[in-house]
Image (tube, rainbow, N blue to C red):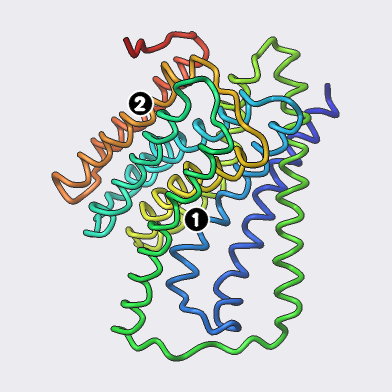
Amino acid sequence: MFLHVILFVLGIAFLWIGTNAVLRRVPVLAGWLRVSPLVITVLLLAVMTSLPEFFVSLFASLRGQPSAAVGNIVGSNFVTLTFVAGVCALWRPIEVGPTLRTRESSWMIMAAALLLIFAMDGIVSRIDGLILLVAYVPYFLGALDDARRQRERENRNNHSAVKRPWLEVIIFAGGLGMIVLGSSWVVENGTALARMFGMSDLLIGVTFYAFGTSLPELAIALGAVLKNQANVTLGEIYASNIFTGLAVVGALCVIRPLVVEPIIIQRDLPMLIVAGVLLQMFITTGRRFVRLEALVMVGIYILFLAAQFMGFSISLD
């Protein structure tokens, strides 16, 4: 048991260190490749912070734990949407820009709703996965077009030189390797520990896996709050949820269709959609995410955790 604990903690640490190594290389490589830093920040940041969710869910699925894979994705999105967003706004109220209020929040709710629709028959098939992947394309192109227009307005033509680009690429690849290895350790040892306590695969996914793989989003969002970069805070949370809900789930289902337990359909996905709608109401009415609203979101996360351990569900009938 002691060895499982050590390897589980090391897995979480590898996820954290590997993701940070990757993220630190993103702006450096952007300058070397002469790509807009805004494109790298807005589009690739969400992809990189979703790597832990993808690899943890992939390993869980390949090990015959589809409930843990789906639970990790739904739980991770719920953690970032409620707990991470709430903690950031409790630290400092967040001013919300028009793009976040209109595009990102709507796409995030749509991603969760699509997943719920496809999961209604108990399985998200390869065809469903392809549809989710295709659905991500318009969002990606729209964000890319906005970034391109903003770069033209700001005339960002200066790109920093990189003295040793090969070293940056090596560190970038090493960070990805740490994410893969850490994900494998989290899945294997977390499962062993949780089963010692009689926990189901679903409960493992929505609690331990979900919170562990949300650590990069929490670190980035809190860092943006401390630097008073409000759009980065909520923007990263929204974009990460959209990428996870559409591209990550889609890719996983193309590799292997995911069986979805009824409790996810009856309880977890509806709660995720409700949380998304509530957060959108908060940021569109006052155009500011304040501490009282943040307390509500953190309270919803506590309710979500209680639902997992107490086993109550929401009837869709």
Three-letter amino acid code at the position of disc 2: Ile
- CA separation in Å, label 1 and label 2: 24 Å
SS category of the residue bearing label 2: helix
Find disc 1 in the rendering and name its residue: 46
In the rendered structure, the answer to whether residue 212 lies left or right of residue 285 reads right
Give the vertical position of 51 relative to 301 (above or below). Answer: below
User: Which residue occupies 47% across, 75% down?
Assistant: 37
Looking at the picture, how far across and down is residue 109, in whole percent?
Answer: 33, 39
Which residue, as the protein is rendered here, is positioned at the far left? 285
Looking at the picture, how far across and down is residue 65, in whole percent?
Answer: 69, 25
Q: How would you rate the neighbour count of disc 2 (Cα within 10 Å): few for under 14, some for 14-19, many for 20 or more?
A: many
Q: Nearer the viewer, residue 226 or 68?
A: 68
Give the vertical position of 52 relative to 192 (above or below). Answer: below
Contact? badges 1 and 2 (CB < 8 Å): no
Which of the numbered marks, if any, corresponds to residue 215?
Answer: none
Give the vertical position of 198 relative to 85 (above or below). Answer: above
Looking at the picture, how far across and down is residue 142, in whole percent?
Answer: 35, 63
User: Which residue occupies 77% across, 37% down?
Assistant: 185
Looking at the picture, how far across and down is residue 25, in whole percent?
Answer: 62, 70
SS category of the residue bearing label 1: helix
Give the image quarter of residue 129. Answer: top right
Task: Give the quarter of the figure containing the C terminus.
Answer: top left
Please name which of the two marks, 1 or 2, marks the residue nearer to the observer.
1
Find disc 2 in the rendering and name its residue: 300
